[in-house]
Image (cartoon, rainbow, N blue to C red):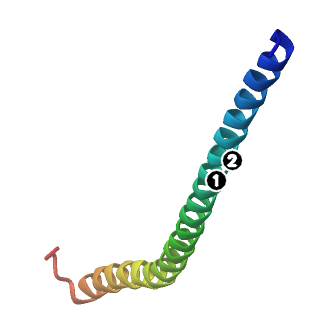
Amino acid sequence: MDAAEILVIILATAFALFLVLTIILVVLLIKIVQQIKRITTSAERTIGRAEDAMAIFQKAVGPAIATKIMGKIAGSLLRKMTGSKKR
């Protein structure tokens, strides 16, 4: 065996080792990407639910505030009409 054959064996072994490491890293990267995809899907669902809840809350709060203001105005007018100074 001369030096060229030994060098070829060393380089082929190094190449095989790097190839195996690359395959392992690609598999791990694919798993990480799939996990990130699941997390983002879950976050999008959660945000959608929060937006729906906020829309329902806004629909309920608007009339409630209007009712409270109207109640205060009606109470104020009623007190003025009856002459009561009670607040």
Residue type at the position of mark 1 = Val
Alpha carbon of mark 2 to alpha carbon of mark 1: how far?
6 Å
Query: Image height check: is 21 above or below 51?
Result: above
Crowding at mark 2 (Cα within 10 Å: few <14, some 14-19, many 20+): few
Judge by depth and name the residue closer to the eye, 15 or 53: 15
The kind of secondary structure element at disc 2 is helix
Q: Are marks 2 and 1 in contact (CB under 8 Å)?
A: yes
Residue at 54%, 79% (x, y): give it: 52
Residue 51 x, y percent position in the rendering: 55, 73
Residue 41 x, y percent position in the rendering: 59, 69
Query: Image height check: is 48 above or below 39?
Result: below
Residue position for label 2: 23
Residue position for label 1: 27
The image quadrant that residue 78 belongs to is bottom left
Residue type at the position of mark 2 = Ile
Residue at 33%, 85% (x, y): give it: 71
Residue 49 x, y percent position in the rendering: 51, 77
The kind of secondary structure element at disc 1 is helix
The image quadrant that residue 10 belongs to is top right
Judge by depth and name the residue closer to the eye, 32 or 36: 32
Judge by depth and name the residue closer to the eye, 4 or 17: 4
Asked if residue 86 lies left or right of residue 43, the reply is left
Q: Residue furthest top?
A: 3
